Image (cartoon, helix red, strand yellow):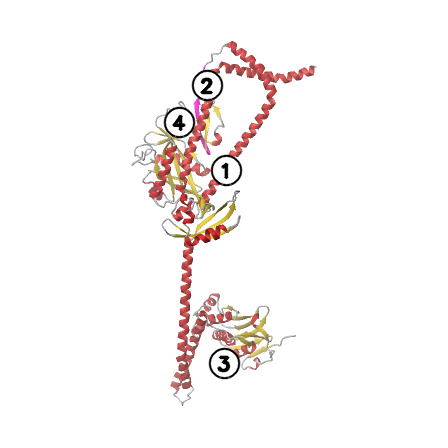
């Protein structure tokens, strides 16, 4: 029984203590009933101040957000920009009574450019540095509610301009710096105006004399493709009348202090340290203000007996109620705390999501690519980027009107775009459409649409994608095609001219060569030695000129595509032997030894034997020309599987550098050295040789080292190989005179 009484005492003792406290509170409340009622009224009044202040500044921020695209877009026409700015300003002044001025700032790379922009509206510009870069912001437009009248605040500068202390003071610079660092709206400290300058002040009271204002600034940044980062392009700002704003949300006496960081503001109503005033935070984005009003105190007129009776009644009731509901109250408080914590997390995530959406929108609208979304049932854009206005001259609202899109697509492109393109596109499919649209000034613009298709729950189709202006690319492509066609026609004309001229020149030249040969050989009787030398010179020069004409004729035929291969089965071993025999005498005269090597019997091949012989003779002639007396030339033929037949002409001549080889393969290209100056030529031998090899589906490879020698490899594909020669390398080549021949029979 004693234990039970002990538990009872332990259970009721806390309740009795709590009841006593509640009773004292009730007595105090009864003694100050009038004051309590006033306190409740004042609490509601202070809450209204916080809500009213936040709502008023939110309206100002909406006006700034509506003007931000002006600062982000380039200045195409100053008059048009001023008209758009004035329209936005009138809308802001119609909704907000507390703004004394509305200012549009533009970024400039230099102080001189900033001064030029601001010279008509402001006495000063803003200069500050961020991230190691200096920025200049110049006011390019100013609007006040009653019209821009000089001498009326804030247009109290010389000539009715913004004074430098307002437009470029330290407060404005701090405001911009904070806004850029946080990528958010912000407000500067309060200013007071004494008629000459602006000075900072910590707070504003309704009873203060003179002007009390603060800047509300929104920086505008755009994506810079050159750096891959966002860069400052301008700002919009509202000069807010702090006394007017405070007077609209509170009655005297009241004080507005700030700005403070959002985390420093109280969540609700807070009593000051002295207990003589109460304050509430006015959150405005990342910063906010603190509104403070005095506490209202009234005297009590309740009799003492009433107070004691109320105290005893409250004591008994409080003990029973608190004991019975204590656990429930604790659970409710814990739930409220969790709810408050979740609410703060939700607000934070919502703010982060909003900032992310704003950044993505600024990024998408800062490029030349136009994002869009369209309702295909109504054939209109539900959203399209502001870049479309710059491209076409029509505003965004026009493009979002039903039918406007279809009407401004070129009539020849409408069917392939809206019927073949959109109607045949399934859900989730991707397509690229190119068509032409008509701009406001009548010009034709080529666009490329990259889009996807999706379905709504009601079955209607919507599309979204990106649009790109490709007019310049189409124009350049057309010019390139015209230039290519003209070049091809000019080249064809040139080749035909050279072919005709070469043919016309060869006929009389053959007669000259023939008569010179008759005179040289004295077929009709002896001549004097001098005349005989002349005849030999005429004959030699005529042969050289004929060779040049033949080279030009071959080159022109190749370029004109008129050369035809007369293909037949050819014994390559015999062909190489004949080539060596043809040039044997010339090589001997030059003191050069020619060696023919055929390690294994060569197969027959389907080739134009005359053209292949021309290739080998050209390469061997070059080798003789550039090999010093006592040198050696090796002519080698072999089958190299799986690549094909290879004919190699290797010499021990002067060789070439890499740069000289490039010159040698150019048309009319000649290498300038002592040996080349002693031998005339057109510089067409190697280009013609390579072209003839390529006509056979082969390849000409060249290896050379200066001072060592040159090796030329003529490759013929295996598709031209027929069979091994029946002679099986029996040595016919060895029967040729004046040189070494090595022929080995195939094993097996």
Q: Choose top left, top right, bottom left or bottom right for residue 7.
A: top right
Q: Nearer the viewer, residue 231 or 610?
A: 610
Mark 3, secondary structure of its residue: helix
Inter-mark Cα distance, 1 to 2: 41 Å
Q: Residue at x 52, y 78 (%)?
A: 579
Identify the disc placed on residue 585.
3
Mark 2, secondary structure of its residue: helix
Image coordinates of residue 646 in percent, x first then y, are 56, 71
Which-is-in-front pick, marks 2 and 3? 2
Q: Who comes first in sequence, dot 1 or dot 2?
A: 2
Identify the magenta region.
Answer: 285-298
Inter-mark Cα distance, 1 to 3: 92 Å
Q: Who comes first in sequence, dot 2 or dot 3?
A: 2
Q: Choose top left, top right, bottom left or bottom right for residue 716.
A: bottom right
Identify the disc placed on residue 352.
1
Mark 1, secondary structure of its residue: helix
Q: Who comes first in sequence, dot 4 or dot 3?
A: 4
Which-is-in-front pick, marks 1 and 4? 4
Inter-mark Cα distance, 1 to 4: 32 Å
Identify the disc placed on residue 38.
2
Question: Residue 292 in magenta?
Answer: yes
Q: Who comes first in sequence, dot 4 or dot 2?
A: 2
């Amino acid at each position: 029984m004693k234990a039970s009484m002990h538990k009872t005492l332990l259970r009721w003792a806390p309740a009795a203590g709590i009841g006593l406290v509640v009773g004292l509170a009730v007595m105090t409340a009864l003694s100050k009933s009038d004051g309590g009622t006033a306190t409740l009224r004042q609490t509601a009044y202070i809450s209204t101040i916080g809500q009213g202040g936040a709502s008023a500044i939110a309206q100002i921020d909406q006006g700034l957000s509506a003007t931000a695209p002006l600062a982000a877009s380039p200045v195409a026409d100053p008059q048009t920009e001023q008209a758009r700015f004035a329209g936005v300003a009138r809308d802001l002044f119609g909704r907000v009574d507390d703004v004394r001025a509305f200012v549009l700032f533009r970024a400039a790379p230099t102080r001189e450019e900033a001064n030029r922009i601001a010279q008509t509206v402001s006495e000063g510009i803003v200069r500050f540095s961020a991230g190691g870069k200096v920025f200049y912001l110049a006011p390019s437009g100013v609007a006040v509610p009653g019209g821009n009248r000089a001498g009326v605040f804030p247009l109290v500068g010389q000539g009715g301009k913004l004074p430098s202390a307002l437009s470029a003071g330290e407060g404005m610079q701090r405001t911009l710096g904070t806004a850029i660092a946080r990528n958010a709206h912000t407000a500067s400290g309060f200013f007071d105006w004494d008629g000459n300058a602006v000075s900072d002040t910590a707070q504003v009271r309704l009873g203060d004399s003179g002007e009390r204002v603060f800047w509300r600034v929104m920086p505008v940044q755009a994506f810079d493709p050159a750096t891959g980062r966002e860069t400052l392009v301008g700002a919009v700002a509202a000069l807010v009348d702090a006394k007017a704003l405070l007077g609209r949300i509170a009655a005297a006496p009241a004080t507005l202090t700030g700005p403070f960081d959002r985390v420093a503001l109280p969540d609700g109503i807070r009593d000051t340290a002295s207990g003589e005033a109460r304050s509430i935070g006015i959150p405005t984005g990342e910063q906010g203000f603190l509104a403070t009003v005095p506490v209202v105190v009234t005297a009590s007129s309740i009799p003492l007996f009433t107070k004691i009776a109320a105290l005893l009644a409250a004591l008994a009731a409080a003990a029973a109620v608190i004991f019975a509901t204590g656990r429930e109250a604790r659970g409710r408080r814990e739930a409220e705390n969790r709810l408050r914590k979740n609410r703060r997390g939700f607000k934070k995530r919502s703010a982060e999501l909003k900032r992310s959406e704003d950044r993505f929108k600024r990024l998408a609208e800062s490029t030349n690519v136009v994002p869009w979304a369209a309702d295909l049932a109504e054939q209109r854009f539900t959203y399209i980027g502001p870049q479309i206005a710059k491209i076409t001259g029509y505003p965004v609202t026009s493009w979002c009107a039903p039918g406007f899109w279809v009407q401004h697509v070129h009539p020849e492109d409408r069917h392939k775009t809206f019927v073949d393109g959109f109607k045949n596109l399934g859900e989730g499919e991707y397509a690229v459409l190119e068509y032409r649209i008509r701009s406001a000034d009548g010009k034709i613009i080529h666009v490329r649409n990259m889009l996807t298709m999706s379905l709504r729950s009601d079955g209607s189709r919507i599309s979204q994608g990106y649009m790109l202006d490709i007019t310049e690319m189409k124009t350049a492509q057309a010019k390139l095609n015209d230039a290519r066609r003209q070049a091809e026609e000019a080249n064809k004309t040139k080749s035909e001219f050279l072919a005709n001229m070469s043919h016309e020149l060869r006929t009389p030249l053959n007669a000259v060569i023939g008569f010179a040969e008759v005179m040289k050989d004295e077929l009709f009787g002896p001549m004097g030695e001098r005349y005989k030398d002349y005849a030999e010179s005429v004959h030699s020069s005529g042969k050289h000129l004929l060779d040049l004409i033949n080279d030009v004729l071959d080159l022109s035929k190749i370029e004109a595509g008129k050369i035809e291969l007369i293909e037949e089965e050819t014994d390559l071993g015999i062909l190489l032997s004949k080539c060596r025999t043809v040039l044997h005498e010339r090589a001997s005269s030059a003191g050069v030894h020619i060696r023919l090597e055929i390690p294994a019997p060569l197969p027959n091949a389907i080739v134009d034997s005359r053209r292949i012989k021309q290739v080998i003779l050209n390469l061997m002639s070059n080798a003789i020309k550039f090999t010093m007396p006592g040198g050696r030339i090796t002519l080698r033929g072999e089958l190299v599987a799986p690549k094909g037949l290879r004919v190699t002409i290797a010499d021990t001549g002067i060789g070439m550098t890499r740069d000289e080889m490039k010159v040698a393969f150019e048309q009319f290209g000649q290498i300038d050295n002592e040996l080349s100056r002693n031998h005339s030529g057109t510089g067409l031998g190697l280009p013609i040789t390579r072209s003839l090899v390529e006509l056979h589906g082969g390849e000409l490879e060249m290896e050379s080292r200066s001072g060592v020698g040159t090796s030329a490899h003529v490759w013929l594909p295996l598709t031209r190989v027929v069979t091994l020669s029946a002679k099986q390398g029996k040595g016919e080549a060895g029967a040729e005179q004046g040189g070494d021949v090595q022929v080995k029979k195939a094993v097996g």
